[in-house]
């Protein structure tokens, strides 16, 4: 694993993550319900609230929309009547006959609607209008009594044998909707219907622990909207709030990075891991903030625990909890019931982390989701009881029907269930991350240790000796990894695949030879080239089988920059006196181990191979052999790039010695039974025979 030595890279990544989260917070348009939990039926737990200024309380939200619809549907539009229309028509046409004049008088008295009003009547948009009577009071009139101008013209033309043009000249609409006044009147009626009361400055809006009624809910929302309106008029306070948001995000994200610097510096040096951690956290915060601010009631549906689960799978549980803490505290900046939200999310996420530890089976995700659900639910019930919910109502009819007088919301439990069902499918996210970032989960490593994989089957068929060697190295290395707290599954998988390159030339490796040694016909340099090539050949096979990069790295590093010493020494011995042998053709390409797991594999591989050629399998001989090999590797600088300590090396030596001792324990020799004389048939078959 290559580390980035520059300090500027992790700083740049951290700044980018902070900028993303900060921009999201500053651009978020928060509503009152995101500042306080004011759900109807909940208790007000924020102390006595006193109005800091006078305001008019009105109905809001869906209630206001319903009232607007009701007032609008019941509103009777007012119409203007042109009382001079008939006189003006008769004056303009003095030659009109008396019968025609009488007909016109009846039409104008009934009311001739203008084209706009007539179209509204025909479409049933208007069924009644209010017309001012002689007493100056508006009276509702059924529009059925009105006639359209077109109808009036047709009536005159057909009744008095007039030309349409003549009839049209005599008909002038005298009833029309007063559009301007009606709009103002409708708005006034709506405002009056929405008005609840006027709250004066210093009036108590709600007392602590009071249950929020529907009316109180709308008063609270109206108060917030008024305060928000006042706030938006003060640019200086807006900047103050934005600066506060930025400062809080910087503090929280900085604390997470301080944790990485102090406890996990290798994550900071590994650019890919650091970018993944920071961007995962930033993306989760951004999505959660967006979801919460646009659908506050669904704040518990968001699977925040997915982030610590992913961090646990690909990193460790401590880093997972640090990410959970940062995520929950940052997103709590946009929720109203902050204490309940933080406590519930932390407990649910914490239980998810504890239940995961190592993901070795898909079923663990289902168990993890179930445990997280229990954590969420118990935390919510405990907090609800603290707020005074009467648990005797738990199974009452009101509870299940969502009675607004109760403060225990069954819907929240359903949200938890949806949340945890989503968590149980996080295997998809794990798979995507493995493919995108090249990380390897514990479940993948467990799958790789199955000896029935195509590569393992091919190794066991073509290289039986190498296969047995790999199994024994896997046993040694995994025991050593367990003792020093390294990744056991990674070491086991790496050990099984570290020598797969020998598949192409099995006979050139001692463990696969059966009497004939093909190296006898080659010069040392040729033999060394073939032996060393098993590393590069193994990498090709691993890439062809789509093995994870971390396994490929272990194949490359299990010999490091070591030498094929047998052939190098043979070349020296065969050379003429004074000849200098170039060590390059006898040196493995490396690199040296860069992780504890690769270093453990190198030690176990060398010790297991040497053990097979050890003539003396006494405890002392095994101890001396292990000490000589590992100390030689350390002296050659093989472990300089790996984070292994002297204590780790000592522990690994002891474990390898103990395991090799168990390999050397001789079995009890089985004894063949002597041939027994045939039994006397008469005696065996005799019913009077006595069994011995």
Image: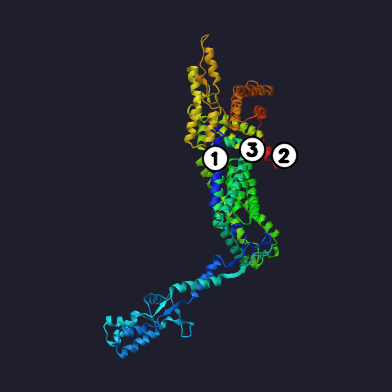
Q: What color scheme is it? A: rainbow
Q: Taking 424 as reference, is 47 left or right?
A: right
Task: Estimate the x, y position of residue 70 in percent, counting from the top left.
Answer: 52, 73
Label 2: state its secondary structure: loop
- Residue shown at 59%/42% (left/top)? 313
**642 lies above or below 691:** above
Q: Which mark is residue 263?
A: 3
Q: Which of marks 3 and 1 is nearer the N terminus?
A: 1
Task: Estimate the x, y position of residue 232 in percent, counting from the top left.
Answer: 55, 57
How many angstroms separate mark 2 from mark 3 (CA)? 76 Å
Task: Estimate the x, y position of residue 520 in percent, counting from the top left.
Answer: 50, 17
Q: Where is mark 1, residue-wise?
A: 13
Q: Which of marks 2 and 3 is nearer the N terminus?
A: 3
**686 lies above or below 656:** below
Residue 87's quadrant in the figure?
A: bottom left
Q: Assess whether mark 1 and mark 3 are in contact (beta carbons under 8 angstroms).
A: no
Q: Which mark is residue 691?
A: 2
Residue 361 or residue 451, whichever sits in front: 361
Label 3: state its secondary structure: helix
Q: Which corner quadrant holds the C terminus?
A: top right
For this orientation, the residue located farthest to the top is 577
Would you call the spot at circle 1 few (<14 residues within 10 Å), some (14-19), or many (20 or more)? Answer: some
């Amino acid at each position: 694993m290559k580390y980035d030595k520059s300090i500027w890279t992790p700083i740049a990544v951290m700044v980018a993550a902070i900028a993303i989260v900060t921009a999201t917070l500053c651009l978020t348009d928060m509503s009152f319900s995101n500042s306080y939990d004011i759900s109807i039926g909940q208790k007000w737990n924020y102390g006595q609230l006193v109005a800091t200024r006078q305001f008019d309380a009105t109905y809001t939200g869906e209630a206001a929309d319903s009232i607007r619809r009701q007032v609008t549907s019941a509103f009777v539009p007012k119409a203007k009547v042109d009382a001079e229309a008939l006189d003006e028509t008769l004056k303009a046409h003095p030659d009109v006959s008396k019968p025609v004049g009488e007909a016109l008088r009846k039409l104008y008295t009934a009311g001739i609607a203008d084209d706009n009003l007539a179209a509204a009547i025909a479409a049933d948009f208007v069924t009644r209008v209010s017309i001012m009577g002689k007493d100056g009071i508006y009276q509702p009139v059924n529009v059925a009594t009105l006639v359209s101008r077109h109808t009036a013209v047709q009536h005159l033309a057909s009744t008095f044998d007039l030309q349409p043009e003549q009839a049209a000249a005599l008909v002038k609409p005298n009833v029309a909707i007063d559009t301007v006044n009606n709009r103002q009147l409708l708005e006034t009626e709506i405002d009056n219907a929405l008005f609840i009361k006027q709250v004066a400055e210093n009036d108590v809006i709600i007392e602590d622990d009071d249950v929020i009624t529907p009316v109180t809910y709308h008063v609270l929302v109206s108060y917030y909207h008024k305060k928000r309106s006042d706030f938006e008029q003060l640019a200086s306070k807006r900047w103050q709030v934005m600066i506060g948001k930025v400062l809080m995000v910087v503090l929280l994200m900085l604390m997470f990075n301080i944790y990485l610097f102090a406890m996990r510096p290798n994550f900071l040096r590994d650019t890919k891991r650091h970018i993944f951690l920071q961007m995962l956290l930033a993306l989760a915060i951004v999505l959660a903030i967006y979801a919460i601010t646009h659908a506050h009631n669904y704040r518990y549906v968001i699977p925040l625990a997915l982030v610590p689960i992913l961090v646990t799978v690909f990193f460790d549980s401590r880093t997972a909890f640090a990410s959970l803490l940062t995520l929950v505290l940052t997103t709590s900046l946009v929720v109203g019931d902050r204490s309940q939200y933080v406590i519930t999310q932390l407990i649910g996420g914490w239980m998810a982390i504890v239940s995961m530890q190592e993901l070795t089976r898909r079923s663990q995700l289902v168990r993890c989701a179930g445990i997280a659900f229990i954590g969420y639910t118990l935390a919510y019930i405990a907090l609800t009881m603290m707020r005074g919910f009467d648990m005797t109502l738990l199974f009452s009819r009101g509870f299940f029907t969502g009675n607004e007088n109760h403060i225990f919301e069954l819907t929240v439990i359903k949200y938890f269930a949806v949340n945890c069902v989503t968590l149980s499918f996080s295997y998809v996210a794990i798979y995507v991350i493995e493919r995108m970032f090249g990380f390897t989960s514990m479940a993948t490593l467990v799958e790789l240790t199955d000896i029935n994989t195509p590569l393992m089957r091919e190794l066991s068929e073509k290289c039986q000796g190498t296969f047995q060697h790999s199994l024994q190295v896997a046993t040694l290395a995994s025991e050593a990894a367990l003792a020093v707290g390294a990744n056991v599954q990674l070491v086991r998988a790496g050990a099984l695949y570290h020598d797969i390159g020998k598949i192409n030339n099995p006979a050139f490796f001692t463990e696969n030879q059966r009497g004939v040694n093909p190296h006898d016909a080659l010069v040392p340099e040729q033999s060394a080239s073939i032996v060393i090539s098993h590393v590069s050949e193994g990498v090709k096979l691993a890439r062809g089988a789509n093995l994870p990069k971390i396994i490929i790295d272990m194949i490359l590093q299990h010999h490091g920059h070591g030498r094929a010493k047998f052939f190098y020494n043979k070349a020296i011995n065969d050379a003429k006196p004074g000849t200098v042998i170039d060590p390059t053709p006898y040196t493995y390409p490396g690199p040296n181990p860069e992780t504890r797991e690769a270093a453990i594999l190198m030690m176990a591989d060398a010790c297991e191979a040497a053990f097979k050629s050890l003539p003396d399998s006494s405890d002392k001989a095994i101890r001396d052999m292990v000490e000589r090999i590992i100390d030689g590797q350390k002296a050659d600088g093989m472990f300089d790039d790996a984070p292994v300590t002297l204590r780790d090396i000592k522990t690994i030596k002891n474990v390898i010695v103990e395991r090799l001792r168990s390999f050397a324990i001789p079995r009890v020799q089985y004894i063949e039974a002597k041939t027994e004389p045939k039994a006397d048939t008469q005696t065996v078959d005799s019913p009077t025979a006595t069994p011995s």
